[in-house]
Image: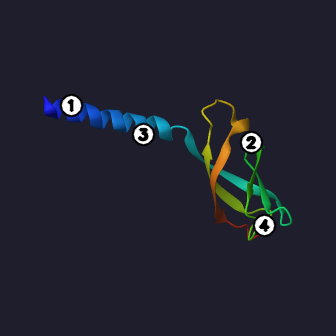
Amino acid sequence: MKKVLVMVSVLMVLFSCVSACAEIYPLTARVYAVDHDADTVVVETCTGILFAFEGAEDWMVGDCASLLMDDNGTTSVLDDCILSARYASWDLSK
């Protein structure tokens, strides 16, 4: 009986982790604009949606960013938030 209870407890924890992680997704975007005065970077997804984050120090227009996004538990992309932004690559043709 103890083994069954332990297994059920483990499964409940695993399922709660999976459902919590389902709201987080990766996204790649291209830097659209950089405002060093406001310390803001605006990125554009391949579908044309613009997102912004703080920390403009080394970003340049055209850079590729790997984003970790939170969907806020909704189906609309427009209210999603950037959890993390990392530099992914640069364009040698600039």
Which SS class for mark 2? Answer: loop
Q: Which residue is disc 3 drawn over?
A: 17
Look at label 4 and name its amino acid. Answer: Met
Q: Earlier in the sequence, mark 2 or mark 1?
A: 1
* Residue at the (62%, 37%) spot, across then down: 72
The residue that appears at 28% across and 37% down in the rendered structure is 10
Residues tagged 4 and 1 counted as in contact (Cβ below 8 A): no
Mark 2 or mark 3, earlier in chain? 3
Q: Residues within 10 Å of mark 3 (few under 14, many from 20)?
A: few
Residue 18 in picture, x, y percent from top left: 43, 38
Give the spatial CA distance, label 4 vs label 1.
54 Å
Give the residue at x 28% y 34%. 9
Q: Which of the numbered marks, if any, corresponds to residue 60?
A: 4
Front-most of residues 71 and 93: 71
State the image coordinates of residue 66 (x, y, percent, origin top left): 63, 56
Gap between marks 2 and 3, in whole Å?
A: 29 Å
